[in-house]
Image: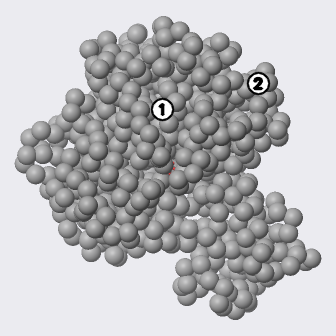
Amino acid sequence: MSSETPSTSLENLSREDRRFPPSEEFSAQAVATSELYDRAAADREGFWAEQARELLSWSTDFTQTLDWSNAPFAKWFVGGELNVAYNCTDRHVEAGHGDRVALHFEGEPGDTRTLTYAELTAAVKQAANALTDLGVGEGDRVAIYLPMIPEAVISMLACARIGAPHSVVFGGFSAEALHSRIEDAQAKLVITSDGGYRRGKPAALKPAVDGALAKGSESVEHVLVVRRTGQDVEWTDGRDVWWHDVVDSASAEHEAQPMDAEHPLFILYTSGTTGKPKGILHTSGGYLTQATYTHRNVFDLKPETDVYWCTADIGWVTGHSYIVYGPLSNGATQVIYEGTPDTPHQGRWWEIVAKYGVSILYTAPTAIRTFMKWGEQIPAEHDLTSLRVLGSVGEPINPEAWVWYRRVIGGDRTPVVDTWWQTETGAIMISPLPGVTTAKPGSAQVPLPGISADVLDDEGHPVPNGSGGYLVLTEPWPSMLRGIWGDDERYKETYWSRFEHMYFAGDGAKKDDDGDLWLLGRVDDVMNISGHRLSTTEIESALVSHPKVAEAAVVGAADDTTGQAVCAFVILRGNAEQGDDIVTELRNHVAQEIGPIAKPRQIMVVAELPKTRSGKIMRRLLKDVAENREVGDVTTLADNTVMDLIKSGMTGSS
Ligand code: WT7
């Protein structure tokens, strides 16, 4: 394993021997069957071709399932044409499901809106017409910076409908972060709102867009603004337009044009090991096939009867694949919720489950651990009997949280699926199948039918059962990223150079004695804070951009609730004063540069940083300090007294 030891210890996990076989009743009605594995194993590409044709509606059938001749640049469903938005809206109306609810929107203040498939289709058509009128055409990029309101879903689908790739930027990111993403993608339009509701108050968004554009963004012609909170906004005439002025008055007639299967659908930025976020590129046919297939099979979706709720934000890939594209392509009924879990009280989520009769819930371990802390009496006050499948995503789920989730939320009855995937993979890759798999708490278990994964040692050899190593994907898959926007070299370098012909995920994993997979966290300089990916280097660059900071090192330290927490070590410039103020100032500076989620939990002012003779910061040792552990091997340090200095400086500071 690499020098960054995964946060969950192998020994602890090996002792986990609880098993949860599917009940007979569940299996009897399950969407997924064990035959899926056999079919996919017999003919992997044929299996995907079958899924693509069965699950989606194509305007032109494809002639080749996979073209891997220019690896690692894949083309799936070559020659096929489809419109992604048509697949997520119109086709359900045409099939007679126009009256089915697509979205139950619950605003944080308690306001609600319901959109049927017919209404959603009409809204998307209007938005598509409005975007066209604003000069957005096929191939133009659109940045979306919105709270969790129906217009977020409508905007994404409107872009898909006209073939304009969207780049959704999480509303918690700063003006600075938004600016760099707008610039990198050269977006022509930004869609935002005056604000959204968070923790009981309106939180502004438009000022961040104004701030981002004030830094200079030549490519942006218009800003389309949804009125959500009614807050005052600054207005740039000629540039800014209200959604209600141009979308509500637009025609609801719009014919979706077919796009090539490989037409770019979206770019989504994610943190890598360097300071610059990577624009992960996804295309149309393969992405939608796998998003649809996984959403149906992993969650045992019955579109006629289920009420599905994924608690993610559309700013993350989970929101793209499992709020927008997967569920809507499947014609599911779902809940979207704008706000935080404890507004106005800690039972809000369970109130929502009871109110809408949610049957499938998909959330993150960090949320589950928070609910464990709040106590089981809170969910117990609500009727959760509608729930029948629970999902987890974003980080390793510890067995205790898994078992609690099943017992307290799932009434000791529901399957729990721990789903491993990444922004890059586009859709779920490793997960049990409800009704088929005997679940092991804490393990994502097996690659889905059609997916091939392995765990390799340092030399690239598969490890035997019972051992750990690096997770790789050994065959291309339909929803794989097609590259990094504008940086083919970085794509090859990051994912395809560590091991020959295999996709390197950046995660550590272990195969247990049955060959089941246990994910162990990142093996690179990427942290996982509440299921969100943050780069140590990105936060370090934010810190050193402050005039008082000479040097900075950032590590992700284990945290009971958030999985990891950001801990920073900084060396101040000679003339800067120490004290509490500087810590607050630096935390706010990071929030301003990247966003509040990147704020370090702890900042420690030190005189030196541990470095190797070649000048590389040894984050492993700082992590030992941040996690209050005995400091590991210091023999490769250029100056091995540094750690003593840091530790003595540390006394009483944390
Ligand atoms: C990283 C990807 C996948 C959508 C949300 C995060 C970690 C994700 C699991 C899981 C253990 C997981 C990995 C991965 N991760 N799901 N079920 N068990 N780890 O997407 O921001 O692209 O982050 O999240 O470390 O590499 P992302």
Q: Judge by depth and name the residue closer to the eye, 395 or 126.
A: 126
Residue 488 is situated, as x and y percent measured from the top left of the image, at 65, 36
User: Image height check: is 465 above or below 362?
Assistant: below
Along the horizontal axis of the image, is 557 left or right of 335? right
When asked about the image quadrant of residue 130, the answer is top right
Question: Dot 2 lies on which element?
Answer: loop
Which residue ends up furthest to the right in the rendered image? 575
Between the residue at mark 2 and the residue at mark 1, the CA separation in whole angstroms equals: 23 Å
Q: Judge by depth and name the residue closer to the eye, 551 or 88.
A: 88
For the point 12% across and 44% down, the residue is 27
For the point 39% across and 61% down, the residue is 346
Amino acid identity at mark 1: Pro
Amino acid identity at mark 2: Arg
- Do we see residue 264 in this rendering? no
For the point 81% across and 59% down, the residue is 545
For the rendered model, the colour scheme is: one colour
On residue 325, which mark appears?
Answer: none
User: Image height check: is 250 above or below 173?
Assistant: above
Question: Dot 1 lies on which element?
Answer: helix
On residue 150, which mark appears?
Answer: 1
Mark 1 and mark 2 in contact (Cβ < 8 Å)? Answer: no
Q: Earlier in the sequence, mark 2 or mark 1?
A: 1
User: Image height check: is 229 above or below 432?
Assistant: above
- Sort mark 1 into few (<14), some (14-19) or many (20+) by Cα contacts within 10 Å: many
What residue is disc 2 on? 239
User: Image height check: is 333 above or below 549?
Assistant: above
- Do we see residue 560 in this rendering? yes
Locate the C terminus by quadrant: bottom right
